[in-house]
Structures are given as C-alpha cells and as structure tokens.
Amino acid sequence: MMYKPMTSAAEPCYILQIFFPMPSTLHHLVVNKSWNQVVAFVSQLTLTEKVNITTGVGWMGEKCVGNTGSIPRLGVKSLCMQDGPLGLRFSDYNSAFPVGVTAGATWSRHLWRDRGAAMGAEARDKGVDVLLGPASGPLGRLSKGGRIAEAFGADPYLQGLALANTVTGIQSNGVVACAKHYIANEQEHFRQVGESVGRGFDISESLSSNVNDKVMHEYYSWPFQDAVKAGVGAIMCSYNQINNSYGCQNSKMLNGILKDEYSFQGFVMSDWQAQHSGVSNAAAGLDMTMPGDTLFNTGHSYWGGNLTLAVLNGTVPAYRIDDMAMRIMASLFKVGWTVQGAKETNFFSWSRLQFDYRQAAAKENYEQVNFGVDVRANHANHIRESAAKGTVILKNNGILPLNKPKFIAAIGEDAGANPKGPNGCPDRNCNDGTNAMVYGSGTSNYPYLITPDSALQQQAIKDGTRYESVLSNYLWPSVHDLLVQPNVTAIVFANTAAGEGYINIGGNTGDRNNLTLWKNGDDLIKNVSALCSNTIVVLHTGGPVLLDAISKNPNVSAIVWAGEPGQESGNSLTDILYGKTSPGRSPFTWGATEESYGNNVLYKPNNGKGAPQDNFEDGAFFDYRYFDKQSDGKPGSDQKAPVYEFGFGLSWSTFKYSDLKVVKKNDRPYQPTTGLTIAAPTFGNFSTDIKDYGFPKGFRYIYQFIYPWLNTTTSGREASGDSSYGKTAKEFLPPHAIDSNPQPKHPAGGEPGGNRQLYDVIYEVTATITNTGNTMTDEVPQLYVSHGGDGEPVRVLRGFDRIERIAPGASVTFRAELTRRDISNWDSKAQNWVVTSAPKTIWVGSSSRNLPLTAKLQ
Ligand code: NOJ
C-alpha cells in the first residue's frame, strides 16, 4: 500500500478568531473574558517578549523540564512545564498516582476527574504552570508499545473520556493540562534519530506513522477531539512523522485537524527536541518550542532570536507570532492563572539538594532551589482507592476475597522493595522490586511506596494469619520449603516493565521485546502452582502478558492484574484481595500469543537510511476489534479468541442485564458549518529596525541559554547565518500557508470539539442491571455499536458507566447517550462525519464479548 502525505505542508488557519463569532460557546469557560484579557495583554508585548513566551530557555536552563523566557517588565515569570501524566516528575513531597492504564481500568469518570484535580493541585502548589499530561497517544495499538501504560487503554472512546475528565480535573485547579503525544506515537523505536543512531541504527529521519484519514479521525485523533471539547489548554506534538511529515510541522494535523476542524483554542507545544525547522513549524501551527534548543544543550534555537528575525524580515507574518502569544496566554487565563498569582517554582528538576546552580546547564546562579513544599494533602486516599478500583480480577475460582486465611506465603521479587530504595533508579530505569509505575519521563518520585509484602503482612497480623514472604524469583529451595507445608495459600508475584525509549532495561528500549513475564516470572508461577493448589497470581504490568497457560492451570485459583498502581500499591492490592472494594475491568485484550494481536512494533528500520515506514495497515483492527474480526466476536469460537477480552473483569457478585430500551431523541438534520473566519488580527506595533533587537547593553549572557535577541544587528543575513536568508516564505511554503485573509470554516468544525451537532444526542439507551448475587459491589455496563458497512469492526465501544455499590437484589438503570458522532463514520471525501445507511446494531453487557442485550437502531 502506498501512503502519501495527507496534504501539503501548510494549511492556513486563524482559529482564535472564532472567539468573535461564537461568544457564547459553552465549552470554553472564559472565552469572552479571556479574549479581551488576552488581547489587552498581548497588545502591550514587544516582539521579543512575544518570542520569549514561545521559546524555551534550553535544556536544564531553568528549574523545570521546560521553561519559557520570562517578561520581567510585566512581572511575568518564566513559565514552568513539568511532567507528567501520573504526577510531578523530578520533585519531592509529591504524590505518585496510578499510571494511566490503571486509572483507565477503573472506567470511572469521577475518579479520572479526582485524579486530575489532585495532580493539578500538586502542580499548582509546586509552581508548575503547565502539567505535561495526560497522555492518550499511544492509543494502545501495540501490545508491546513502550508507553501504552501512560495512556488509558486500547480504545479511543475510553481514552477520550478519560483524557477529557483528567483535563477538566487538572485545569480546575488553575494549571494548564497538556494532552500528548499528538499523534500516532505508538512505539518508541525510531522516535528520534539520535537515540536510534546511538543504538546502532543508521537512519537519518524519525519513524513515519502512516495513517489514513478515516482511521486518523475515528481512532488516533478521536481522544484529542474530546480533550479539545473539554477545553484543554495545550497539546504536545509528537516525535514521529505522520505520513512523512514531522509531528510538529505537519500542517494537516496541526492547522488542519486540530486548529481548524476541532477549533482548538490553546497552544501546540513541541515534544522535547521534536522541532526540526523554524519557519515551517510556525507556518504549520506550532506555538511553543520545548525545551527551546535545537538539540539538548546546543545553545542554538530554531526560534528565539531566529523567530524574532523571521518576523522582522516578514518570513513569519506578524499575525502568527501574535496568534502564538494569544494562544499561550489565553490558555493560562482560561484556567484562572494570573501574572501576580502565579507561584514561583519551589522545586528543582536537576537535583534534590537544597542549594544548587539554578541554571544547571551553565552552572550559574547558586541559590536555594528546593524548598521542600509538601503538596500531597490527602491524595493518598484517592490513590489507594483508584488503584484498587483499577485492579482487575481475571480469574477466581472462589478463593477471593480472602477471609483470614491460615497461612499466606508471598513469593516473588515483585512483592518487595527495590534494595536501592523506591527512587533509587532515576526515572525508574531499572525493574527491581515491585513495579508500580512506568519508566521514563512519565514518572514521579515516590514519597513512599507501600509494597505488597508490607501491606499483606499488616493485614495478616490483624487477622491472625501466619505470613511469610520470599522476595526473590530465584530462591527456589526456600520457596519449596514453604509451599510443601499444609494450609498454605500462595500469592505469587510477577511483572514486566515498559516505558520511554531513552531507557534500556535488559535490552528492552521502551517497547517490550516480548509478552512474557520478566525475571523468570512465568517459571516462578509454574513452579509455585505445581506445589500449591491455592495459588493466587498477582501481576504488575502496564499492558498484556501471555496468560493462556496460567489461566488454564487448575492450581492457579486466581489471577489479579494490579497494573501499575503508584505509591499505595500494597494497600490497593490488599483492598481487592480481601474484598474491601470493587475491582475494575481490563482496558485492553489479553491474547493467547504475540501473533494473536495481528500487528507488531517495527523493531528494524525498513527504509534504508530514510525514515522507517510504519504503515498502520491494521487500520481500526487492533486490540479487541482485531480479535473480534478473527473470531467473529463469539467467545471461544476459535483458537484466535482472546484469553481475557477487552472490558472483562470478574466482580464480587453476579448481575442480570434486562429491559433494553432505545429511544430516539433528535431528528434534526446535520448541518455542515459554513461561513468564513475573520481575517487574522495583529496586535501591537513593533519596530522593524533590526538595530533595536540586539542584546540589551551590559546584558550578562548565560551559557547555552536561549534568548529572543540577535547576536548581531548589522544585517539580517549575518544575524541568521543562513544562506537562504532573504528568500521570502512564498518561495518555500505552499500557497496560502501564511495568508491572513478570512478562511472558510471547516464543515465539521465551528467550536471546540468540532461541529456542535456532532454532540446532539440521537438515541438514549437504557437497560436494567440487577444484582443477583449476595454482595454489594460495582458493575461496569458497556455499550457497543456496530456501525455496519464494509470493512467496519464487528463492534466498537460507545458507552459505559461504573455504577457503584449495587446492593444484592437491587436493580439500577444503566443509561447511555449516543451522540451523532458516536454513530457516525468519517467520510474522507466529504471531510465530515456521516451516519451511513448501513444497518446499525447496539449491544449492552459486561464486556466486549459478554453482551446479552442487543437492539437495532432505527
Ligand atoms: C519527552 C517525552 O516524550 C514527553 O512525554 C515529555 O513530556 C518530555 N520528554 C519532557 O520530559
């Protein structure tokens, strides 16, 4: 199959203009207020001040993983961008939340909002202005993809709701959320040239994820559309190329889908070193470059002084730098950020010392950098609850919940502590002791880590249970001697780790090399269960592992997937093992073999020295959609059926599903958005005399720090040091790339999240759920839709709820609203969503394969 770039490198778009025609839009909380506030603010900025807030100061140039330049004249601090998706990175006295995929497994909107709100509060109190999370790219296409656990599961609908609710939570506490990584960032191999060359791969460009327009809309960009609708302030463009155009200079993805079609009002920030040019990024829709230098610590920037120069000589039009500044300030003001109220950052990314060089790269300005501000409040309660509710019981022959067992033997390194301490491996770059988070930038320092061993022991002491643990995978004689004793319940722990591509653990460079358990885990389980017929398997993994043999093993009485639970790991696990709270449902499929997933990480370059080409030929058919296609959605219909399907998880009770009702709500025909935007406005005047842009007199230059000023002001050509200087943008950008005239609005666009009518509720679906067992517990009813038509998946998730604490005998109503978007497909020709004429069916049940209720949509 041949893939072509979806469009030329630039599509003009001036989206902030829609603030004018749509003053009453509901989804941007403070649109009118912020518009006026932002115009007033940006109008007073000089050109270099505007450039300063678009450009990072360089790697390790300030306290956070990324900082913009400041505006001292107006008292604007250097804005702090800090990872990440499970809480603050490189900090102290902060919480370590469950990873995204464990949060995803709760299927709980309010827990996602609470998690976001707690992370936002911690960021705010540490002086972080933009939190670099949540993540929804990767979407979970690849079961071995390194960073799938940072996001919420292998389905766009689930991810979209988790992303949007997390954004809402974070921003409710005055911190801008940054949804990442936009887009199709599904694997770690070849994401960056330097990293790949360092590992002996001779490539000169990053991987290209080649995705067609329909799959892009229905899968990869779907969650980001939800985030935009929720008002997300920032979106991070990714390292990879999309259809052979880099993520941060791909105009189709940035100007086109994000800013035009989705009407994204905030700013696009580059991933770290993901910018590969200057003017083309500006024209394609990048608004902020991070961390500001071309590559870490070069001291040079594609923007900074070069952006100043490009605006001065007209290569980048003035409206575009205004648009960048407007978007950045609008996002801040929208969440309630103020110049006076913004907190100074009170921690330091580059050391835990109290005093250090604030400009770490330059070793300048020795001062107090860590202030030990404790921001954790009572977040441990949420962490414990949400990690427990995101723990999934995959198998249970009745051994769970535990009730004062006589004797527990806990076996395996994964039950215990890392001998180096919980934070002993920087960015968790080892897998020693229990695994409770990913590795890479999406990590936090633990304030403490409750190991399964310590929590289970506490519980055992309370219950009068005898408790012994062997915290190694290799001390077989000791394990053997425990397990041959009578009355033993064995809890055997095993794990895998996965994370970001700059880290290599045992030859796994981010992406996993296989789906087996690490450190002899599979053998450990086999050996333990061979001696003990009451074996409970506990797994700490960020994604699937091969469970076919384990699931069939009669001595394995239970399998519990505890995900990557964060600081309260042991407590959350104990809460589930002892039935103190309700478990979650799997947000991805557990296949019997690696091949059963039907796709794979691209481990070797396939295009000579050029960009490795990852053709997403699987389209919609990854995870459960692939398994359904193989085995027709019928449980056990053939060898290709999953071991445990998407949406599956056992509960403490049994539920009957009945009384499915579908009510048509809305008949109004869908109207494509029409009309034109206004012309792109410019705010404020600036001198066009290059002489005004040199470094201020007497300025003390900090080594490697990125500034908005020019090194020389004698001539533009000299200042740029660029042989192509003087070429107008017209000569190298596509026609209209920097055209400031009014533009037609996108038919599927119009306001944040797209055409308002996409969210019309077309059907209301209800069903009765009755607890037919003896225990009060939660149920997670799920609604799937078959869109019908050639080449469509058997069914896709389009509704769910976590209904809490349903009493035995009680009936509750599951209610789901199907919007126009939910029942539509993307029509690439029309460039809009359409409800096709194919017959459509819905199913309701407790997993993607246990769907007792079904109806046709009229
Ligand atoms: C690279 C990662 O891909 C991104 O997720 C992170 O936010 C930045 N580094 C900053 O650490």
Image (cartoon, helix red, strand yellow):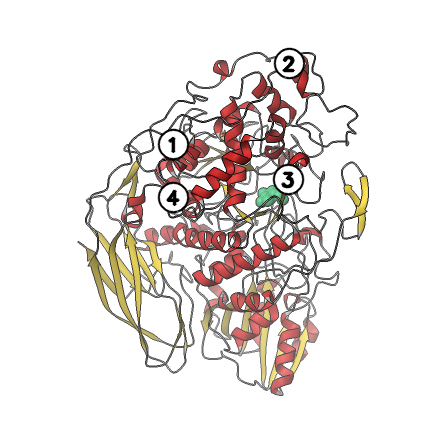
Identify residue type, mark 3.
Answer: Val
Task: Determine the secondary structure under disc 4.
Answer: loop
Q: Is residue 16 above or below residue 135?
A: above
Mark linked to residue 1 = 1
Q: Is residue 438 above or below residue 77?
A: below
Q: Which mark's residue is nearer the viewer, 3 or 2?
A: 3
Query: Where in the image, quadrant-wise, is ligand 1 located?
Result: top right
Mark linked to residue 509 = none
Of residue 848 and residue 522, the one placed in the foreground of this image is 848
Q: For the N terminus, give its image quadrant.
A: top left
State the residue position of label 4: 753
Mark positioned earlier in the residue sequence (2 or 1): 1
Q: CA distance from mark 1 to mark 3?
A: 51 Å
Mark positioned earlier in the residue sequence (2 or 4): 2
Mark positioned earlier in the residue sequence (3 or 4): 3
Mark positioned earlier in the residue sequence (1 or 3): 1
